[in-house]
Amino acid sequence: MVRTLNNMVELRGSRFGRPWPRHGLKLLFWFANDYIGDFGFHHFRNRRECENNVCKRLLPDDGYPFYEVGNLHLTASDSMPEYVSEDNTGNIDTSNMDRLIISMRPDMTVDKVYVTKHEDLRSFDPVNTYRISRGLLMIICGHPFADMSLGYFLEQVGYSTYEPMRYIDQCSSSWMGFLQMSCVPLR
């Protein structure tokens, strides 16, 4: 069952889109504030996943088609704001694991918004998939009662843009024989 996140405290508690360099919170901020058009949305197959004779779908089927966005390796993502993709390493790592999925009504209005992350290269993580309530979207998009900048939003949900050390720059001679690659990028 997909849990609905209704406020900033719940979003922070979900740990979605963290730690750095994940991009899911920036993707959610972009969607709440600037989504117009397709920006690389493509059809999402809410396929049944079976394990130990138990079959489930990632999202509840409400009869509307689903569309996914957030794969920074697709050229369609180039039309997104730079802040969404600025921390993408271009590698297969956590910097491109988050996705936003919407269900779309026949009149082309968004019905529901979900956020999720990959648990491997093929499947999304059902435990870390959340529905984002309209109220939370309104808080994020900064309606008059909640003036929200990207920086303030990221701060409120506990996202640190502090870049952790990427390189080991002090190599211990006792480890040199064992770790010939110890002074190369960790990602």
Image (cartoon, rainbow, N blue to C red):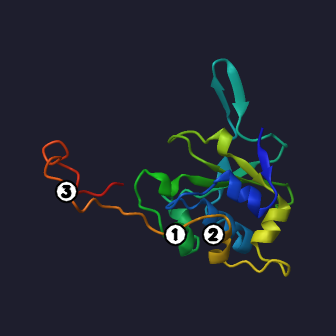
Judge by depth and name the residue closer to the eye, 95 or 157.
157
Q: Are marks 1 and 2 in contact (CB under 8 Å)?
A: yes
Q: Please name the residue shown 74% across and 69% down the image.
A: 32
Q: Earlier in the sequence, mark 3 or mark 2?
A: 2
Q: Quadrant of residue 41?
A: bottom right
Question: Circle 2 sits on which residue?
Answer: 154
Separation of residues labelled 3 and 2 (CA atoms): 35 Å
Separation of residues labelled 3 and 1 (CA atoms): 27 Å
Q: Quadrant of the N terminus?
A: top right
Would residue 164 appear left or right of 107 to someone viewing this image? left
Check disc 2 and give the amino acid type. Leu
Would residue 174 appear left or right of 159 to someone viewing this image? left
Q: Secondary structure at mark 2?
A: helix
Numbered circles on residues, count: 3
Would residue 27 appear left or right of 95 to someone viewing this image? right
Q: Position of residue 50 (x, y in %)?
A: 65, 25
Q: Position of residue 145 (x, y in %)?
A: 85, 79
Q: Is residue 121 visible?
A: yes
Question: Circle 1 sits on which residue?
Answer: 161
- Disc 3 or disc 2, which is closer to the eye? 3
Check disc 3 and give the amino acid type. Cys
Q: Earlier in the sequence, mark 3 or mark 1?
A: 1
Q: State whether residue 150 is above or below residue 4.
A: below
Question: Circle 3 sits on which residue?
Answer: 171
